[in-house]
Image (cartoon, rainbow, N blue to C red):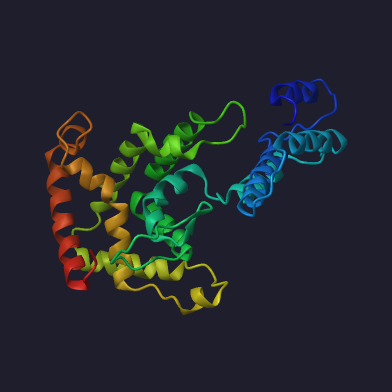
Amino acid sequence: MPADPNDRDTAAANGGSGVHCPLKAPNALLADFIQFYAESAAQTGKRVDVEVLRGVASEFLRSHPLHALGFSVCRRLLNEAEGRTLPPFDRILVEPLRPLLPRFGGTPGTSAPTSHPMLSRRVLPGVINATAAMLGQERTEQFRRRAEDLAASHISPTTGQIEWPAVFADRENQLLLVDISVAVIAHFEDFPHRLAWLMAVIDSHLTPATTPIEREWHFTERHAIALLLAISKPLRRAQASYDADGLANRHGLEAVDAAARFFRALDAAAFEARVT
């Protein structure tokens, strides 16, 4: 497709011409369009010569070097192209909610039958804000740095994009989610009080509804319980694990006891609300 990214970066550093968007947004946008166009055509029985399209795209980039694109613009364009506007920490934090969301990161939510109420993407700012409030500024920044380092370790050398499936499959990602959960559940000793607080924070941070369906959707206690069940799955797995990454080995018996109390309260609330 377009020329090698390293060649463009070198040219830019030497004052030469060419596309030098730090995140290669133009390349990503055109590559995504070509793939989308070819797949759409195939569904109607038409054949598209992808190599020809790539040649046209390369010529387009040579003809329109897009010198004005700075780093912030490139990041915004790439985020919009991928549907991923969240920074690494926030993205990792809310990824366990993906099966409950109608759309997340440009990927349709699960179509399998579930008794969980479907969430709206409107809850994400509230989830992120509530978590940061419970963690405190210092720990939030520590976790943010870990998330950024993890995401940086999975940047594709050819596209310059974060390979999110690899991030989510990484052992460090699971450890990060467990460490965050251990800090969060310390605030849930009075479960009903904290659940009410969580609902209030999320409700106060709901983004504006943009569709009739979203306008009819309201955040309820059942949604909050379903959210907690989903987001605490990594901690539940660690609780039952006795290997080196298990909760007892990583955080000690006090954390194991705290997790047991949290899940007893959460599971009782889920049973009462008929959320499984």
Of all residues shown, which one is farthest toward the front?
45
Instruction: Look at 85% across and 39% down and name the residue there.
Output: 64
Q: Nearer the viewer, residue 184 or 29?
A: 29
The picture places residue 108, in percent across and down from the top left corner, at: 48, 57
Q: Nearer the viewer, residue 225 or 199?
A: 225
Q: Residue 50's image quarter?
A: top right
The picture places residue 191, in percent across and down from the top left corner, at: 20, 63
Placement of the N terminus among the 4 image quadrants: top right
Horizontal placement of 272 versus 109: left or right?
Answer: left
Horizontal placement of 45 versus 259: left or right?
Answer: right
The picture places residue 269, in percent across and down from the top left corner, at: 19, 67
Horizontal placement of 79 versus 251: left or right?
Answer: right
Horizontal placement of 10 versus 164: left or right?
Answer: right
Of all residues shown, which one is farthest toward the right?
63
Q: Residue 48's image quarter?
A: top right
Q: Measured along the vertical axis of the image, is residue 271 above or below residue 70?
A: below
Q: Measured along the vertical axis of the image, is residue 255 above or below residue 115?
A: above
Q: Measured along the vertical axis of the image, is residue 65 above or below residue 36?
A: above
Placement of the C terminus among the 4 image quadrants: bottom left
The picture places residue 264, in percent across and down from the top left corner, at: 13, 58
Q: Residue 263's image quarter?
A: bottom left
Q: How many marks?
A: 0
Q: Nearer the viewer, residue 79 or 46?
A: 46
